[in-house]
Amino acid sequence: MNRELIINVTTTEITIALVEDKQLVELNKESVKNGFAVGDIYLGKVRKIMPGLNAAFINIGHEKDAFIHYLDLGTQFPTLHKLVGNLSNRKKNIRFETMRYEPALGKSGKISSVIAGGQSIMVQIAKEAISTKGPRLTSDISLAGRNVVLIPFSNKISMSQKIRSNEERKRLKKIVDGVLPKNYGVIVRTAAQGRNETDIEQDIMALIKKWEAALNNIRTLTPPALLQSEMNRTNTIIRDSLNGSFSTISVNDQALYEEIRNYIKIIAPDKEKIVKLYKGNAPIFDHFDISKQIKSLFAKYVSLKRGAYLIIEHTEAMHVIDVNSGNRAKVDDDQESTAMDVNLAAAAEIARQLRLRDMGGIIIVDFIDLHKAENRQKLHATMQELMAGDKAKHTILPLSKFGLMQITRQRVRPEAISESKEVCPACNGTGKISPTILLDQQIENQIAYYAADKKIKFLRLVASPFVAAYLKKGFPSFILKWRMRYRCRIKLNIDQSLGIVDTKILDRKNRTLL
């Protein structure tokens, strides 16, 4: 599979398009201004304890207070809390590697017995602010690198389940064991397979330095304050996605080009040449045919092959996707096979749309009814296979007896919505048009003015297809009535470029009267 990363930099935001075999599959937007991103570590201040929820609201500087549940504090929270207190009081000679752990936090405790209002607390953003909700926090801190994830207050070495070779697992564990200090744990990522000892050691040491820098910042900062920022989303995507099938990374900004190139020089020196600086005259997304895909793929209606289509609706509680066969049902005789073909095509597009729009939470898909149990099972298995490459955690339930498939997908940041809009030609952006029940009366008043008052004997009425069909309907039609009533020749022309209820009146020489 050929994978490309196309990055469009403007004065306000960075838009990152991930393309697989020339098809857009992911779109991420990152504001140029500092935001509150997943992975950022903050020194927050406890604003309010909520005993009923067993949770607390934390001020980290966001316009809405962030939320942390008791279970998100982590088992080693007492040790972390003690460390934060000592650093805030500027105590010297605190060595993280030699710290003794406090008694672990139980799973059935109360948050009011652990923290109190006004206290400082070290937290990490687990989920960005979405809609009316503030960020979701955790105090179970972890720092992600290219090959490993570093976990302070742990002594465990875990392996990605995708590393199946026992020899490779033993090799990687031996490398980590040889460099990892006490009081640090590690999760070895899939990307570490085949990497040499130096790469993994450098990754671990770089993450330890980040953690130590965050701790040192506690001495000088007062809450709310950012202690350690996750790398920008561009580098995060590169870190998590870069593999042998990545062919090019194209960017239209010199500064970001240098930043990405330097980053890749560190994590994968052999791939430095895949970073390209785009210097064309056309916008970068137009050049790579991304703009057209964005406009077509973020619409409410998404077309499939042979006339079938999806309808995607979004609500606060869930997302709803309806699968429609369109005109296919009229073409094929076998209803079951037609439904199955449309459903399989829809499943492939739905899996793509979930990644593309980064849709999370509850998704309900209304597939076309299937009567055979084996077809329903096949559709469920196909959907699982199609979403196997989705990095967001998800669960897919079998089709219900009503033909509905329920999907839950992890949501850690707001859904990607493309702002491709145009001013409505009918209302000119006001959101209001004249009532259609008065439309014929308004047109007749204009005709009466020119035919009866101005004595004009020929009028050309130009209207949208919607209005033209309305005026020609029935016998006698509105046009025929007006011709007889005002003794004027009235010719009706259709103009599809007009707004839905707009009209124009021209004279014999096609000069606009109205």
Image (cartoon, rainbow, N blue to C red):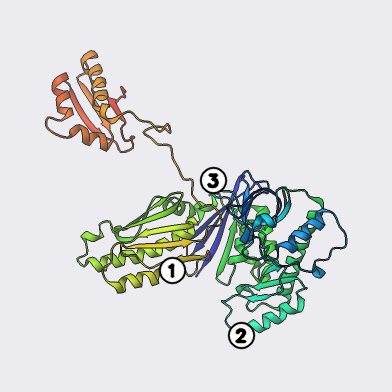
Q: Earlier in the sequence, mark 1 or mark 3?
A: 3
CA–CA distance in space, label 2 to label 1: 28 Å
Residue that badge 3 annotates = 132
Residue 471: x and y in percent read 20, 32
In depth, the one of 351 and 72 nearer the eye is: 72
Q: Element type at marker 2?
A: helix
Residue 252: x and y in percent read 60, 53
In depth, the one of 460 and 352 nearer the eye is: 352
Quadrant that contains the C terminus? top left
Q: Element type at marker 1?
A: helix
Horizontal side of 183 relative to 246 (left or right) equals right
Residue that badge 1 annotates = 386
Q: Which amino acid type is shown beneath numbered disc 3?
A: Thr
Residue that badge 2 annotates = 166
Residue 2: x and y in percent read 51, 68
Q: Which amino acid type is shown beneath numbered disc 2?
A: Asn
Residue 229 seen: no
Q: Element type at marker 3?
A: loop
CA–CA distance in space, label 1 to label 3: 32 Å
Which residue: 77% across, 60% down? 82
Residue 64 seen: yes
Residue 459: x and y in percent read 23, 24
- Depth check, mark 2 against mark 1: the one in front is 2
Q: Which amino acid type is shown beneath numbered disc 1?
A: Leu
Q: Earlier in the sequence, mark 2 or mark 1?
A: 2
Query: In the image as oriented, which residue stretches furthest toward the bottom?
Result: 167
Horizontal side of 41 relative to 26 (left or right) equals right
Q: Earlier in the sequence, mark 3 or mark 2?
A: 3
Q: Is residue 403 above or below residue 48?
A: below
Mark 3 crowd level (few <14, some 14–19, many ≥20, 10 Å Cα): few
- Depth check, mark 3 against mark 2: the one in front is 3
